[in-house]
Image (cartoon, helix red, strand yellow):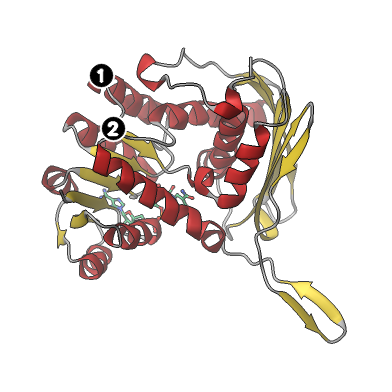
Amino acid sequence: MTIRVAVIGCGGMGSWHAGNLAAQPGVDVVAVADVYEPSAAAVAEQTGASVMDAHAAIEAADAVLIASSDDTHAEFAIAAIEAGKWCFLEKPLGATLDQAQRVLDAEIASGRIHTRVGFMRELDPAHAQVAAAAAELGHLTRVRSVHRNVDGERREVGLLFAQSLIHDIHTIRWLSGREFARVTVHVAERPDGFRDVLLVGGLVGGGLGVIDFEDQAFAYEVQVEVTGELGMAATVPHPRAIIRSQATESMIVGTDWFARFQDAYRLEIEQWCADLAVGVSSGPTVWDGFAAQVVAAAGEQAMLAGQPVEVVLPARPSIYERTPDPIREDQP
Ligand SMILES: NC(=O)c1ccc[n+]([C@@H]2O[C@H](COP(=O)([O-])OP(=O)(O)OC[C@H]3O[C@@H](n4cnc5c(N)ncnc54)[C@H](O)[C@@H]3O)[C@@H](O)[C@H]2O)c1
């Protein structure tokens, strides 16, 4: 059986995902949509899809990949969920917490998980090795994510959290198997207006989630480190060539976030397509997207208020209950 997929949003991420989708057996990219016609036309040519309005594209497909701008995610995700379509939704769930809540409500009302959220670090081979190693570390006491960004443009505080730190928040929730209970945020304002952010979260059941974020660093880097009572596990720097010249040895770190996670983006689409073939949705859920966005909003509030903020999450809805994950079984 061939799965018909629609891609909404044909910019940087959408065009990359579309190329990966088109390479999957049993998948046909039948429709693409973008308000900027040349982008839709380019991806249509690349995949053989037809260009359509976003809602017509949802109608024409069995599964929908949403990679349009953040403020459109909720509208398209809710339409896809209500039409009973499988969905791959780029993070965040929405531009606001209210939009994120509406996506969560729609999926709960549908009674089943339709949607995978694009927290691709779970598929990054280095992060996956840390996740496997974490199972052997006994009770976890700390997960620390270092995120050096090279964006080139200053963003308002809310966007730092909702667009960038949300990945680190998800990583900490995923690797610890725990929710954030409260967050404290320290900020260093640089003379050029960029900010270095240190978020320290207390986790439900104990332990710390720490995010060390630079918005405009010397290079793009993401590292994670998990500490438990029996030891620690950390990612190694992304493999790069060593260059020896003029009596020195060096390694280019690079500024390209896309190159760092290129394999993870491919692997998450491969996993999504394998799931579609058997009619399940695995990986990060709308609940994960919502919980991370609640923490991001608390982080923004804590930064602006200059004091700790409690993270208020509702109980995990029953459709998101899963069999215990091996790395989480020892956790309180
Ligand atoms: N998972 C990750 O690591 C990661 C990385 C980058 C971006 N993202 C997310 O992916 C999404 C896309 O980011 P991007 O970097 O590709 O941005 P982009 O600006 O390159 O692409 C967004 C596209 O959406 C289109 N669009 C906007 N409104 C639309 C609408 N109403 N209908 C159809 N198309 C519409 C735009 O014309 C544009 O082509 C964002 O939500 C972003 O947060 C995720």
Distance CA(mark 1)–CA(mark 2): 11 Å
Looking at the image, can residue 107 be seen?
yes
> What amino acid type is highlighted by mark number 2?
His
Tell me the residue at 21%/67% (across/down).
Answer: 41
- Is residue 90 shown left or right of residue 152? left
- Is residue 92 shown left or right of residue 29? right
Q: Is mark 1 within 8 Å of ligand 1?
A: no
Give x and y (percent) for residue 6: 21, 51
The mark found on residue 114 in the picture is 2
Res 58 quadrant in image: top left
Res 101 quadrant in image: top left
Task: Classify mark 2: residues with Cα within 10 Å, few (<14), some (14-19) or many (20+).
Answer: many
The residue identified by callout 1 is 109
Give x and y (percent) for residue 231: 79, 34
Tell me the residue at 17%/50% (across/down).
Answer: 4
Give x and y (percent) for residue 110: 23, 22
| Residue 136 position (above or below residue 316) | below
Q: Quadrant of the C terminus?
A: top right
- Is residue 63 shown left or right of residue 95? left
- Is residue 254 shown left or right of residue 120? right
Give x and y (percent) for residue 87: 28, 40
The mark found on residue 303 in the picture is none
Which one is in front, 97 or 171? Answer: 171
> What amino acid type is highlighted by mark number 1?
Ala
